Every structure is written in C-alpha cells, then in structure tokens.
Amino acid sequence: MNVTITFRNRRNRRNPFIPIEAEMITPDAFFNNKEICVGEGNRTVHLNELADVGIEGTASSVDEIEILIRGDASLVKRVGEYMTGGTITIEGSIGMHCGNFMSGGRIEILGSADGWLGREMQGGEILCHGDCGDYCASGYRGGRRGMRGGSVEVIGSVGDFACEHIAGGDVLIHGNTGDFACAEMKGGTVTILGDTSRVCANMSNGTCYVYGCAAEMIPTFEKRGTINHEGLLFHHFRGDVANRGNGDLYTARFTYLQ
Amino acid sequence: MAEILLKNAYVIDPISGINGELMDIALSGSRIVEEASPKAEVIDCHGFLTLPGGIDSHTHYSGTKVNFGRYMSPEDMRAGRTARRGPMHITSGYSVPTTYGNSYRYSALGYTTLVEGAMAPLEARHTHEEFKFTPLQDSFANTLFDGNWGMLRALEDNDIKHAAAIIAWTLSAVKGFAIKLTNPGGTEAWGFGKNVSCINQTIPTFDLTPADIIKGAIRANELLHLPHSVHLHCNNLGTPGNFTCTLGTFGHVPDLNDKRQSLYATHVQFHSYGGSGWGDFCSKSEPVAKMVNLRPQIVIDMGQVMFGRTTTMTADGPMEFNLYRLHHDKWSNHDIELETGSGIIPVNYRKKNLVNSIMWAIGLELALLVENPWQCMLTTDNPNGAPFVKYPEIIALLMSKRYRDAEFATIHQDTEKRVPLPAIDRELDWHEIAVMTRAGQAKALGIIDIGKGYLSPGAEGDIAIYPLRIDDIDPSADYEKVIKGFSQTEYTIKRGRVVSRRGDAIIDGENTTFWVKPKVPAAYDMQHDTAFQELFERYYSVRMSNYPVQEEYLHRNHCIETETDL
Amino acid sequence: MESRDVPCPFCGCLCDDVFVTVENNRIIGVENCCTLGNAKFLSKKRLKHPIMRKNGKWVEVTYEEAIDETARILSDAMRPLLYGWSGTIGEAQVVGVHLAEEIGALIDSTTSVCHNPSILAIQEVGHPGCTLGQVKNRADLVVYWGCNPIEAHPRHMSRYTTYADGYFIDNTASDRTVIVVDIRRSEGAKVADEFVQVKPGGDYLVLSALRAMVRGKSDVVPESVAGVKKVQLQRVADLMMKAKFGAVFFGLGITMSRGKYKNVRNAIELVSELNRRTKFTISAMRGHFNVYGFNEVLTWMAGYPFAVDFSRGIAFYNPGETTVIDLLERREPDACLVVASDPGAHFPKSTIEHMAAIPTVQIDPCVNATTALCQVQIPVAITGIEVAGTAYRMDGVPIRMKKVLETEFPTDQEILERIVIRIREIRADG
C-alpha cells in the first residue's frame, strides 16, 4: 500500500505556527485502517483538513506500507511514533519527535529534522539527509535510558545533547554535534565524523568515536594511549571516572578548557 | 436530605458482627440510618459483596515528600496519564499519581478513608493542601515526632508529661491525628549523616536510645488518650538480620489500652529479615508473627512488596541513602530541622532478584502467620512496596494457595530455601479480608467511635459494593475473579453519596480532615512555655506564630477532642 | 496598628519575621526587612482601573468588561498560554491550573527562565536537600556557587548561613567556612574563606574534577581545569570532605550558563558523592517569593513542576518544547494570559514581539513593562500585603502570607474564577 500525504500550505489557517501533532501517521495506523486524526493546538481535526491523503493498493502486513509525506511538514510532530514496520519517507523537513519509540521499519528524511528525532527508539532505522535539532536519539526527561536499539544516521550536523542517555543501538553523525553529545551514555555506539564539544560527559558505558576534534574534553577521563581505528590514529579515553564509568571514548583530536 | 436505599446488599461487616447476610441498608444525609423514606433513591445491589468503605491505615499520598516523588519523576508521571472526563480532572503518574489520580483510583477500589503515613509538622500545611485535592476520601495525618527536639528533650529529662504536652501542642497546631515515629533517633543522627543500628544504642544530640523514645512516646500517647496508638516505623528498616531489632522493639511494648493496641508497627515486611548480609538474606516472618500472636497489644501492617516499578519514600532518610548506594539511581533527601528527615528513590522489584522475591514472600507470610486478622492490616506501604492499585492482587494471593504457588513458580528459584511460604496452606476468607482492609483499620486507628469501618445505623455512609457474588466464587480457584471484583466497585459511596461508579468518579466530592486536639490544662499549654518558645526563636527557621496550620486549610474538618491525664 | 511576623512577599527566602506598622490603612513602617522587601511593602504605585486598548488607545473599563474580553480571547484561542504565577499564592495558582486544563492551554511559570535547569537536573538524579533551619543549626561549610546572595537574597546569610547562630555552631564567624565559586569576584567573594574563580562556561568541568577527587581519583585530573589550578581544587575537595555538614547553594550562574541542567546535575552528583563520606546538602536559590509554590501546585495537580501542555486533554511536559521562551520564539501561542510576573521586563526581544502581536492580557496590580504588550490589564490586590494565602519557601516550607492592609481590589483568585465562569458561559452559548 502506498500512502501519500501532502500537507497543504497553512497560510490561510488562523495560526500557521501552531504545530500539528500527528502520532497517528504510522504504517501501523494505516494498516489497521484507522481514522487519522491530528491535534492542531487544542482542537482535534481530521488529517484531511490539513493534507491531501491518497491511498493506493493494499497491504497484507505493516511492512508493505509505504508512506510518503510531501509539502511542508516542518511543524508536524510525532510522525512514526511507535511504528513497528513499513516505511515513511519525508520529502522535506519534519517536526519534532519523529520516530519516537519506533521498534521497526524505516524512516527517511530528505530534508532536516527538528528535535528529539528517534527519542527512546527501540529498533528500526532512521536516515536524515539534512541536519537535526537537539536531543537526536536521546531519552525523555528524567529517564535513564534513551535510545535502546536500531540505528540513526544523520548526514548533516546535530544540535546539543545528541544521544543523551543512549543505552543501545548505533548512531552515525556525518557532521558536527553541539554541546554535550553522548551525555550520560550507557551503551550503544556513536560515531561522530565531525567536531564535538564536552562529549561523553558522565558516561557510564558504551563506545563513542570522534573523527574530528573533541573540544572542552571532560577532565575526568583516564588516558589509555592511542589506537588505530580504520587506518586513523585515535586517543583512547575511559570514563567518566567521576561517575565510576567504564565507557570508551576514541577521539582523533581533543582540547581542554584550561 | 438525600436518601439512598441499598437493596439486596450481601453484607460483611465485622464490627457489627455481620458475616454474609443479604440485607438492605438505608442512608440519609451522610449517615447510615435505620430506615429510609419512600423518597429514597433505590440502588439494587443484586447480592453483590457490600463492605464498609476501605480504610488505608498507612499510605503516602499527600505532602512534601510525596509531591517531590512526583516532581522528580516525569517518567513515572507519563506512565499513568488519563484525560479529563466528566467531573474527573486529568491525572498523571503510576506509582505516585497526582492527587486526583490517587483519589479516583482509591475510590475505584472502594477506599473512602486514608491515613497519610508521615507528615512532617513543619511542612504540614502542604499535606493539608493536598488533602483538599484528594476529594473522595477522608484524610488523617500521622505526624512525625521521631526527631522532635522538644519531645526528645523532655524525654531526656524523663518528663513524660512535658513530652505529652509538646505532642499535644504540635498535633493541635499542625492538625495531625497520631504520633508517628520513623526510625526514632535515626533521623536525628542523619542530620550529620549517621544512623542508629540498635534500639539500645544512645543516639547523637540527646542522651536517649530509640527504645527510650518508643517507650516514652507510648506512655505520652496514653496520657493524651489519643484515638490511635503510637504508629511506629521500626529502626533498621531493610537491613538483613533486622528481625531481632523488631522483636526487641515489640518486647518493650506495654499493654496500656483495652480498646486497641498500644503500638501499631507499620510495614513489618521490611523489618522481618534474617541473615547477616545479602548473601544469606532470608525470611524471619515466623518469629515476628509469633511475637505478634503472643502480644495482643501490637497491631502490624504488611508492607507487601509486589513486582514492578515503584517509588520508595519515607521519612527514614538514612535508609533511603543506603538504598541509593545499592541502586545508584536517583536519590532525593529532605531533612527537616528539629523534627525528622525524608528520602526518595525509585525502585524496580524484580522476580529475577532473589532479595526482592524473598521480600514478596515475607509480606504474605506475615498476613498468613498472624492468627488474628485484627492484628495485621493489608498494606503495601503505598507506594513503597507497590502502588496501592495492587491491593486486589494481594487479596487474591491471601485467599488462594493455588495462586501463591503459581506466582511462586515464577520468582527466583532459590527463594524456596529462604522462606516458609510454600509450606503455608492457610487461605483467608472474605470476612478476614474485610477485617484486614477496613474493620481492623477502624479499630486500630480508634475511629469506630466517629462512625468509621462499619455499616450499622449511626455509621458514616462510607460503603463499597463490589461486583462479586461470593457464594458463586471459590476464591481458592477463581482468583482471577477475585482480582477483577476487587479492582473496580459497582458503587463507592462516600458520606452518603455515590462518588464512584464502575471505576469512574462521578462527582467532584469534598473530603473531611480529621485531627486531634488533646485538652491540656493551662500548666501544660506549651503556647506560653518560655523554653519551648525559645526553641523556635533560636533554632527553627520559621516564627512560632507562623507554624500552626490555620483553619483556612481545613475546608471540612472534624476535630477529635480528647480528655488527658495531664 | 502593628503586625508581627509578617512574611515578606519578595524573594524565595520568605523571611517571616517582618514587623509592619500600619496607619490609616497605609504601611508607614517596616522593620527587619531587607531593602528589596522594604520597597515592596512601601510601594504605592498601582493601576486603579482595568484598562483595555480600543482603537489603539488605552481606555478605562469595568472589571466585567475586562473579564468578558479576557474570557473571549481565551476561549477563542487554539494555543493559549498562561504564564507567570510566581508572584501570587497557591490558592490562585490552583485556579490557573484548572483554567489551563479546562481550555487546553499551555501553562508555565517564571521557573522556565530561572531554575528550569535545576528541575531538569533533579529529574535526572534527585535532590539531596534539607530545610534552611537544618543548615543554620548544623552547617560548618557553606558553598555559594554561581549566586550572589548579598544582592539577590540579602538576608540569606544572616538568617541561615554565614551570620546565623545555630545549635551546633558556637561561633558562626569562626565555625563556618565559606567557599564562593563564581566567574568574577562578586561581593560574596569578599566574605569567602576560599574563592574559586572559574572561566565562563567551566563550571561543569570543575564539578567533574571535584567529583573525581572526592572519589580519590585525583590522578586523572589535569593540572588546571577551566582556569582553576589543581592544587586549589584539591584544597576545596579536602575542605568539603572534612566538613561535618556541608551546604551548597547555587544560582543562575550555573543554571543559565552553557550546559545549564548538566551543570546542576553535576553539582548534585558531587553532593551525592560527598554524602558517602560526610553530610552534604544542595539547594537552589529560588527567586520570586512563591516560584516554588507554583512548582508544587502544578506537580500535585498535573504531575509536573512547570511547562505543561494540556492541549491534547492530558498533561504533556517537555521543557525545550513546552517552555515559554521556546513557544514564543516559535510563535505558537495565539493568546496569552500573564499573571503575577513581568515578562516584558526581561524576556528576549523576539518573544516580546510575539506577545505584542497576539491578544495578551495581564493580571497585575501595577503598570509594568508587560503592560505595553497587552490588550487588557486587570489590576488586583497585592498578594502578601492585601491578600493572605500560601507560599512555598525556596526549601519547600509552606508559609501563610498575611493580609496587613484592607483593599477594595479583587484578588488574583477572584479574577481567575470569574474568567473561568465567563468562559463556561460563553461556551454554553456556543
């Protein structure tokens, strides 16, 4: 089944800046033939009010559902939340919380993603061609386990607190990160091809590679020498000692704030 | 006045001596009456089990510590969210629900009266504010005295009357109900990061032992003729081998009151541990239950642990810190000047964990080994052992050996060698459950006189009607039906009005706060005692005049005045 | 007439020993109070009537008309924001939360722009704290980190720490050690036994280093961390471990500097670590007199201390998404009700522009910077002077504010209740 959701321009709506909460836009909901309603501020409206929805073909499992999102979806939140299979492709940019709690399937974003992409993700894949906001592949407030499985790849750069509380899965960031990437890391593997800042603060476990420069290194990591990884020389750190941590941080370059 | 006639109610009312009779109950205004007029609204109970409204004699649901449990746990808050519906407000939270969450969910289980287990006097105003937003249950507040400098100083001088006078002033000032001691001496020691490990060890700051504090408080309690006895959270909570401390404590309790116990020991499951460490940790429910069986002056509650996530919260600051060191999870602590402490950490009781499995067994053992159900109340020390929504499962476990065995097969396999549970065949009956969930509480709290815990004319119109036809159910085999039946009342009636129907609150409600005011002769009125005033002047951070909880905080309230022997 | 033990409705210290003299229903004398509190008690400026903008001009209107207009604005809105709350009592805040729930609004308080990061940190690691009297009686070591009590909480030191007598403290001048940590040498640094100057943005790193040292892992710490020499860090760590009771107070210097809640989290974790060796507590220096009260009220009613979105019928909380600055920067709200705070005075420009662009109503006794952004302002009685009710001190101790003056002005609570009733009427009329 192919589902095409084309968001209409909202200039003529009363307030085009109100985000749309669209947790029902998942392959699962279409597979179960649910009526798709979304939140627009404190009103609940049918998706048809905001988008043209076209459905072609049938599906015998969730995995046979492909959703294509077109038009301006940059304020559309929670797309793909709890999805278990199938695919969602977003032609442009997507709002916050895309792919939260997803356990299977694939989301591909051709534009950029707002904050909390793949928050508390359990499985499946997310590929974002543009940049990503804060808290990419992270956890919820007060939570101790962020992303637990699956993979996230961001071709661009990400904001602050990327992979906060990450406990499992793989994250690959081609660009730079903001501050505090991999804070409180507990597991999983994160690879940052660009530069980062205060990386792996307070980590207890897991592995992080930084191909660029780790600025403002946390001063409580133990230096363990250098290693060769994929033909490059990396400094190996263990920590965070302040937190009784046993995580591994490999970075090509680093600086301290002195 | 609104009237209700309940027809065909299958009543178990242990205090009135009714054990399974099909009868009608008439309500007029807030009370049960002999007869209703023809104008009464008739509710056909279809022979369903009808009990006095449930009473939880030890639960943490209001006040600084509880609210901090919510405050620090957005992950728990999102776990139990419900939307606004009819007169019901939104709720959040699973193990520490919002005030409305507590109230609606307790009401769905048929509970109409709650006793907040631990109110710090300095922060009492907060507890009373939350009581107001727990609209479907009446509230009582156990008031913490374990580290009260005024009381401890009087006990140090061996002046019980003076100690009683301070208790009387404080209870009246903060609108409290009973004396609560939490790890007596330990919370004072925690002021400098220490604890006490034995009831005969001298505590810091005062030349007293925990045993002195407990004995002194019991005597002061009886001098004041308080409705409830001293309500004690023993020392050494949660430590392997602590059962000797518990037995030692029970051994000190005199029998001073012919209407009720002289000591209520709470969440005794947490105090019935054997072993010298976690390696040989085991159940000592048998000696503890035996001691209770020999001493009618003691009533306990279970403090049952059920598996899953919850939040632990207690005034026992040092104990929570020990738990924090075990779990290395988040930890909050809040010491209260001159009075007590408190701590909070989240826990997850897991079946795969041997210690947790043994804890689960101990609570059940206590309830099954204490022969007289009037001496053992059903609690989880909500939310410490489990959130109160687990009560129906606990009832079913106590009523069915088969259910216990089925559960036992799923827990840590080494549990069998450490606990007596598998050998216990006793199955509690409906009457015993009614005692352990309402009638026993009313007696132990000393609130039968004010109309609580029974269904005869004159009683408060607090009634729970469960969709259970008990003659058709064999609880031993049909434990699923027992769980379902106790999970949601057909009707919960509070003060003569139906407040909850099949799990939904149907009115906004308004509760009553009960508090005590011992009548103290002028010579013992601490209001004018200069040494007591000086305590405030020099060491408290609030002025004495700003300390008492004003009447404005008690929108509906019932003051229980007591005659004293001062 | 004289009133004793009046709690001061200014800062989170909530000093409750103020002596107020009233003559002809005017305050003519204030004793025991700091200059900030004094100014509040003695302030005479206020707005006399509700005002509304009509055709671009301010017009005096009746309370009824102002309330009707407010109710229409709020019931019409798809994403209303109810903001402020820290300068009023719990009894009014409760009505505000019910209002937000009923109309599916966002509700947030000034917490959002001060100790929001402290709460996020507490939600990650908890909070080892205590009441202020515990510090007064026991603390032999006091640490002020990123805060300036002398200016922001003028009586904090004399009531609770440096200059306060305490049960276990024979001589407060010699028995209490004071450490001040800041990015610049502030007034407080002058009274410090040890002043630690950290490079801007370096608090997190310094805290990590101290944690490692308390754990006995000094060897991993480099010779200098964020401008602080290792020898000084070691000296501070030793002072902390040697203390019998240490009390850390922190302020916006760490909550609002780079890293925000991670800084606070690290400070809390340092304190938790220290508790394995001695007694330590940590406390936030809360600003407005009842900012903590709003956190308490919203928590028991909705489960979260601030920044709650009721738009989907349940309580949703996610600072960064549901917090006032973020919402206004994204131009989401289409109506705003400001109660008992003055965002116009200190919010970023872009957010103020949005507030001015949407219908904004303010409930406040005085004309202030926010007035310029409003369509309607409803003057009310002054809480804590003309209205009694509950406030929560920075350490969670609830105190009843007093009424020392009579007034004809309605209270925040009354106005909010009337708005709720009016909204219900409007909705019932369809």
Image: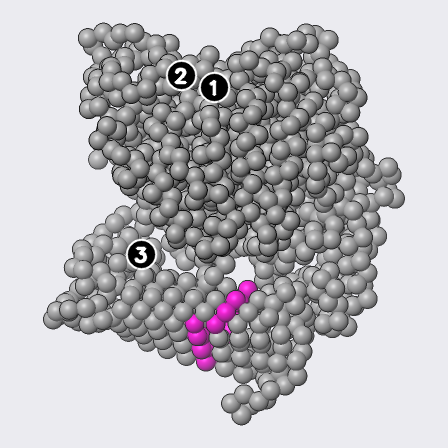
On the image, numbered disc 3 is attached to which residue?
Answer: A21
Q: Percent x, y for residue B548?
A: 62, 22
Q: Percent x, y for residue C81?
A: 41, 45
Instruction: Report the quarter where the C terminus of chain C lies.
Output: top left
Alpha-carbon span between mark 3 and mark 2: 55 Å
Evaluate whether label 2 is on the same chain as label 1: yes
Q: Residue at x 38, y 43 (%)?
A: B404
* Label 1, residues with CA under 10 Å away: few <14, some 14-19, many ≥20: many
Confirm whether residue B150 shows in the render.
no
On the image, numbered disc 2 is attached to which residue?
Answer: B15
Residue B229 forms part of the magenta stretch:
no
Residue type, numbered disc 3 = Glu
Q: Percent x, y for residue C318?
A: 44, 53
**Compared to B271, does C407 lie above or below?**
above
Number of numbered callouts drawn: 3
Q: Quadrant of residue A198?
A: bottom right
Residue type, numbered disc 2 = Ile
Q: Are marks 3 and 2 in contact (CB under 8 Å)?
A: no
Residue type, numbered disc 1 = Lys
Task: Give, as a single range, the part of the protein colored magenta.
Answer: A169-188
Q: Percent x, y for residue A188?
A: 48, 72
Q: Residue at x 16, y 59 (%)?
A: A33
Residue depth check, mark 3 versus mark 1: number of the one nearer the observer: 1
Element carrying mark 2? helix
